[in-house]
Amino acid sequence: MIQLRTLLTVADNSGAKKAIMIGMPGKGNRRYAYVGEIINIAIKDAIPYGQVKQGEVMSAVVVRTHKEYGRKDGSYIRFDDNACAILQAKDNKDPKGTRIFGPIAKEVKENGFHKIASLAEEMY
């Protein structure tokens, strides 16, 4: 459950380290974003020679949330941090980076982000 101004860890190698959520495109005044949803982020911390720079506004997909959520089979899952993976463009579902660090939720693949799921180390 990610809301406005939530600080996120960037889980790919695009050059960004920390990002902050600034909105949800096309969702009106919805309050929260969940795993597998596209959000707009602003880069807060980046490495000097990465693909993205500090202050850029980009779109990303949420891959991990600290708040637990229930699945249809009755189980609950939660992660140690809030994380996202930066996307190429708003309509595109391909990641900007070539590696995804840490585990991701299987809801990311179910929502159509197959390339991110294939790059991930492990999926829960």
Image (cartoon, rainbow, N blue to C red):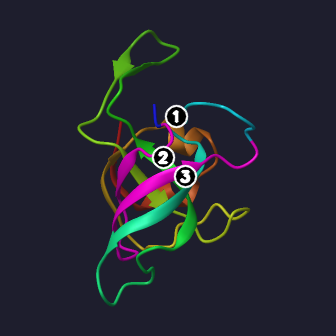
- Viewport quadrant of the N terminus: top left
- The image position of residue 62, as x and y in percent, is 48, 46
The reply, left or right, for residue 25 in relation to residue 101 is right
Front residue (pair 5, 18): 5
The answer to which quarter of the image holds residue 33 is top right
Considering the numbered disc 1 on the image, is that residue within a helix, a strand or a loop? loop
Q: Earlier in the sequence, mark 2 or mark 3?
A: 3
Would residue 117 be seen by someone viewing this image from the given angle? no
Q: Which residue is mark 3?
A: 22
Marks 1 & 2, CB-CB < 8 Å contact: yes
Residue tagged 2: 62
| Most distant residue in the bottom direction | 49
Disc 1: CA contacts within 10 A as few (<14), some (14-19) or many (>=20):
some
* Quadrant of the image occupied by residue 94: bottom right
Q: Which residues are magenta?
A: 3-26
On screen, residue 35 above or below 15 = above
Which mark is first along the chain, 3 or 1? 3
User: What's the distance in space between the residues labelled 1 and 3, CA to CA?
Assistant: 14 Å
Indicate which disc residue 34 carries.
1
Give the SS element for disc 2: strand
Q: Given this view, does label 2 or label 3 mark the residue nearer the observer?
A: 3
Q: Give yes or no for residue 55 being in the magenta stretch.
A: no
Q: Secondary structure at mark 3?
A: strand
